[in-house]
Image: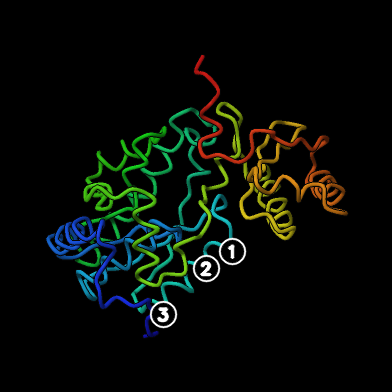
Amino acid sequence: MASSPPVADRSAGPPLHLTEKWNALQGLLASLEGVVVSFSGGVDSSFLLVAAREALGSRLLAVTALSETYPGREAEAAGTLARELGVDHRFVESEELDLPEFRENPRDRCYFCKKELFGRLMEVATQEGLAWVVDGSNLDDETDHRPGKRAAAELGVRSPLREAGLGKQDIRDLSRWLGLPTWDKPSFACLSSRFPYGTAITRERVGRVGRAEDQLRGLGFTQLRLRYHGDVARLEVLPDEFPLLLAPGVRERIVAVVKEAGFVYAAFDLQGYRTGAMNEVPEE
C-alpha cells in the first residue's frame, strides 16, 4: 500500500472558520460506517476521499468510472492519486454512450449518465458489503442545473460535502490544509458538456473534441473548453489569459488543431471560460 503524500502543518487544526464544518463532515462520514466513493480525481471527490479515509480508515473503496467522455489523462491522474493516498481503488466501465436517452442530449442528459454510474457503484457497494455510495456534490452545485441530483436521490446516494454545508472554496481551503495536490486543480466536466443540448453526442464527436482539447492544453492555458457547434469550434479560456491567444504562433496553432479535428471554423468566445455555459441557451 502506498504511503500518504506529504501534508501541510495540521497541528493547529483546520482553518478556524471551517473547523465546525470539518468536524460535521467527519461525524457524518463516521456515521455511514462504510462507503464507496465516486472518485473522479477532481477537487471535490479527492477531498471527499481523504475526509472519508480520516473518518473511516479502511472501510472505504474509491471507484472511478471509465468511458469515452472521461479523458484518459484524468483516469491516470485519479489512479495515481489513489495510490498516493493509500486507499483501495477500482475502475469500472460506464457505458452512457450506449443509452439513446443520453446520446440524444436532452437538458436532463446528466440524469441518465448518473443513473448509469450510480447503479454500477451501488452494485459494487453491495458486493463489498459497504453500506453507502457517496459523491462529491457540494453546496455550490445547488446554484447550477444539475439533473444528476435526481438520480442520486432516487438511488439513495449521499452527498456528504453538501450535507455538511461545504462550498467549493471551503473544499479548496481544506484541501490545501490537508496537503492535497488537487487543492488548486482547475474544474473539469466530462466531454459531453461540450455539446449544446439537442446536438447528438457520438463517440466520433467526443473523440474529436477530446483530442483537440488535449493538444490545446499544451499551449499554456490554465483552463479551456472547446465547445462543439457543427462546423464551428468555440474556444473558451480564462479572461486573464486572453493575451496568450496573441502570443507568437498560438493563434495559428489553435486554427491548425481545430481544422485537424474536422472543424471548418475556429471561434473565440469573448465572455471567456465559465461553468454551465451550455445552460445559458433558453429552453424552447
Direction from residue 234 to residue 155 in the image, left or right: left
Q: Which residue is mark 3?
A: 5
Secondary structure type for disc 3 = loop
Q: Which amino acid is tagged 2?
A: Ala
Labelled pair 3, 1 in contact (Cβ < 8 Å): no
Labelled pair 1, 2 in contact (Cβ < 8 Å): yes
- Looking at the figure, which quarter contains the N terminus? bottom left
Q: Which residue is mark 2?
A: 77
Direction from residue 252 to residue 193 in the image, left or right: left
Locate residue 24: give its quadrant.
bottom left
Residue 28 location, x and y as percent? 16, 57
Residues 83 and 169: in front is 169
Lower position in the chain sequence, tag 3 or tag 1: 3
Its colouring scheme is rainbow
Direction from residue 179 to residue 125 in the image, left or right: left
Q: Residue at x 22, y 51 (%)?
A: 164
Secondary structure type for disc 2 = helix
Q: CA distance from mark 1 to mark 2?
A: 6 Å
Residue 73 is tagged as 1
Residues 27 and 66: in front is 27
Residue furthest out toward the top? 284
